[in-house]
Amino acid sequence: MGVVLRPVLQRNIFDHLEASYPNEGGGFLLGALDGEAVRISDVIPVQNVFAAEEQHHRYAMTPQDWARLEDEAEIRGLALVGYYHSHPDSPAVPSVYDRDHAWPNFVYLITSVRQGRAAEMLVWRLRADRSAFDPDELAVSD
């Protein structure tokens, strides 16, 4: 499988997540299947609406955000293929909370933001039985 992300889109994600620090930031990944890979065509930041005192380790968006982004993807001939978010001062590894709120058909880019700087980006896929995430390959290239 794998995920292909252009360098400019990775930089856009890093800029958004660094600006969100020390809180979690996140957004959607728009793209399409390209053979066995998921090719990301655009990234859309979405405001963190989790309770302010919990945003340092939790991220949430509204159902309206989800619906709006699904509509935008369809209009642009793309699909909502995944989601990105940060783990401030924590590893880029999914938490139990992440697993409980994830979907098996999406890809998840998690970025560790350490002391305000993006340090590591990893890609994950939730198993169909929702028991765990598995790592996937990330190719940052044009």
Image (tube, grey):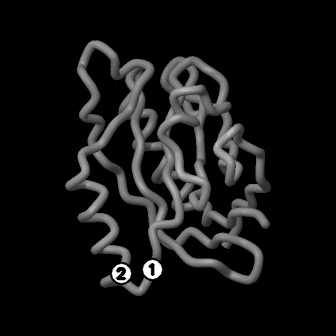
5 horizontally vs 50: left or right: right
Viewport quadrant of the N terminus: bottom right
| Disc 1 residue crowd, few under 14, some 14–19, many 20+, Cα 10 Å | some
Along the line of sight, the residue nearer the viewer: 91 or 67 = 67
Q: Tell me the number on the disc at residue 78.
A: 1
Question: Furthest residue to the top?
Answer: 53
Residue 119 pos. (x, y %): 64, 31
Residue 94 pos. (x, y %): 63, 33
Q: Residue at x 24, y 22 (%)?
A: 51
Question: Furthest residue to the left?
Answer: 64
Check disc 1 and give the amino acid type: Leu
Residue 48 pos. (x, y %): 29, 36
Q: Residue at x 69, y 63 (%)?
A: 3
Instruction: Kindly identify which residue carries mark 2.
Output: 74
Q: Are marks 2 and 1 in contact (CB under 8 Å)?
A: yes
Q: Is residue 56 above or below residue 3?
A: above
